[in-house]
Image: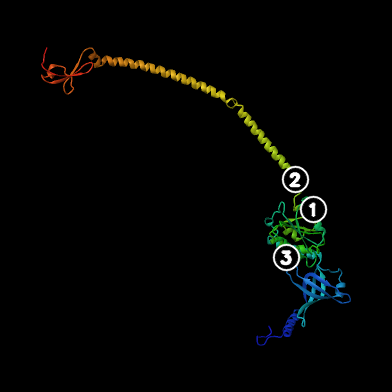
């Protein structure tokens, strides 16, 4: 139960520290696993100081271990190594600080490390971090390459020399950091995030030379793998040699067998691309030349046709046909007009022969009454009745003075 305290009766710091010490002392000895972040051996002292950190969370704890215990190990331990310790937590009352006194220390062997890495690999694979559909394609020619590597390392030289040999004008943004030991994961993750925020960095290469399983352990760290998976920029893993396969290789968008291979992966070969462009230009010219030759042949074939070889010949023939047709049409029209003229003349003669005018021309006259009717006998004309007499030329107005029936 918590110690009784109120605003009016607060606990003194010494009392609080004593209560914390009581609870810590009840914990007893515990087995703890972690990575050695710092190991201090001071000459002439029998006590060494050890800082153990968690490889996933950013948590560390200070420990004290006897030099006799360290010297009695079959294999010496060093910073960056994974260990298991049996320690007793202790609370320093006056300093208010927690430390652990190590009673037993066991380095984690390569077999145990590999087994734990395999478990982590299964976990990350189940979450889909290794899926091919989430991997991004590398750019053909990046504007700038981000490189995370060790300080003055051979891996940096391998990446830079091979990349610039293939494409001399390539720009490389380098972030040198610790790539082995306790601070490697945090340093690499920080450099990765820094490069990922750069807008002109199109690909990031994480490169390190070969080493033991323990040396390459930071590149199988869960937090680093998740950081690579969350990057917006494609990441190339170039860790160790061909046989080295840290978990970073599975999470990254592309894996290079060595840093040298990474330098050839991220940029094209300028010589090869120059030859490819030359081949494309030759192929393009060849296609264009063939197209021009084919179309020229079609044009020559079209121009060789009579209608295009001598266009005036066809027009002359048509003009002759039109002239002949006009001549024949004119002759036919003239003949038709002559025939119809003769017919009209004949009909005109018939009309004239049958016309009353011809009779009048012979000396006859037509007598009409006042209403215009023709008077054919004396009964239609009474004495004193006005009549009109039509002659061959002109008319006469007469009046009946007498009637002779003979």
Q: Residue at x 67, y 33 (%)?
A: 293
Mark nearer the viewer, 3 or 1: 1
Q: CA distance from mark 1 to mark 2?
A: 18 Å
Query: Pointer 2: what residue?
Result: 274
Tell me: residue 29, above or below residue 236. below
Q: Quadrant of residue 96?
A: bottom right
Q: How is the image coloured?
A: rainbow
Residue 24 appears in the figure: yes
User: Which is nearer the N-term, disc 2 or disc 3?
Assistant: 3
Residue 250: percent from left, percent from top: 73, 58
Residue 260: percent from left, percent from top: 80, 54
Q: Quadrant of residue 209?
A: bottom right
Q: CA distance from mark 3 to mark 1?
A: 30 Å
Q: CA distance from mark 2 to mark 3?
A: 42 Å
Query: Pointer 3: what residue?
Result: 223
Foreground pick, 371 / 299: 371
User: Which is nearer the N-term, disc 1 or disc 2?
Assistant: 1
Crowding around mark 1 (Cα neighbors within 10 Å: few <14, some 14 to 19, many 20+) is many
Residue 385: percent from left, percent from top: 12, 21
Query: Pointer 1: what residue?
Result: 162
Foreground pick, 388 / 328: 388
**Disc 1 + disc 2, Cβ < 8 Å:** no
SS type, badge 3: helix
């Amino acid at each position: 139960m918590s110690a009784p305290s109120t605003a009016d009766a607060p606990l003194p710091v010494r009392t609080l520290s004593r209560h914390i010490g009581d609870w810590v002392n009840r914990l007893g000895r515990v087995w703890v696993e972690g990575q050695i972040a710092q190991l201090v051996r001071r000459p002439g002292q029998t006590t060494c100081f050890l800082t153990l950190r968690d490889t996933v969370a950013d948590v560390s704890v200070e420990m004290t271990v006897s030099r006799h215990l360290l010297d009695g190990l079959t294999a010496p331990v060093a910073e960056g190594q994974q260990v298991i310790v049996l320690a007793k937590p202790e609370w320093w009352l006056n300093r208010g600080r927690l430390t652990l006194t190590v009673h037993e220390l066991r380095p984690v062997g390569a077999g145990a490390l590999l087994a734990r890495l395999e478990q982590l690999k299964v976990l990350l694979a189940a979450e889909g971090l290794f899926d091919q559909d989430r991997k991004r394609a590398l750019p053909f020619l990046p504007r700038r390459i981000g490189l995370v590597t060790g300080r003055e390392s051979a891996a940096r030289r391998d990446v830079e020399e091979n990349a610039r040999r293939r494409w001399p004008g390539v720009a490389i943004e380098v972030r040198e950091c610790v790539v082995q030991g306790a601070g490697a994961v945090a340093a690499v993750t920080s450099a990765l995030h820094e490069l990922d925020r750069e807008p002109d960095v199109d690909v990031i290469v994480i490169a390190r030379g070969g080493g033991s399983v323990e040396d390459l352990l930071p590149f199988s760290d869960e937090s680093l793998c998740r950081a690579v998976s969350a990057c917006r920029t494609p990441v190339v893993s170039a860790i160790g040699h061909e046989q080295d396969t840290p978990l970073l290789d599975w999470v990254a968008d592309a894996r290079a067998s060595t840093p040298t291979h990474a330098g050839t992966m991220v940029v094209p070969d300028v010589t090869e691309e120059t030859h490819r462009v030359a081949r494309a230009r030759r192929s393009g010219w060849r296609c264009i030349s063939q197209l021009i030759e084919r179309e020229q042949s079609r044009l020559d074939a079209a121009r060789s046709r009579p209608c295009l070889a001598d266009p005036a010949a066809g027009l002359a023939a048509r003009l002759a046909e039109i002239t002949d047709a006009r001549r024949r049409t004119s002759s036919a029209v003239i003949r038709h007009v002559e025939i119809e003229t003769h017919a009209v003349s004949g009909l005109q003669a018939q009309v004239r022969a049958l016309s009353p005018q011809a009779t009048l021309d012979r000396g006859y006259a037509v007598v009409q009454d006042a209403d215009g009717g023709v008077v054919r006998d004396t009964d239609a004309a009474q004495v004193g009745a006005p009549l009109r007499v039509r002659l061959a030329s002109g008319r006469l107005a007469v009046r009946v003075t007498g009637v002779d029936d003979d």
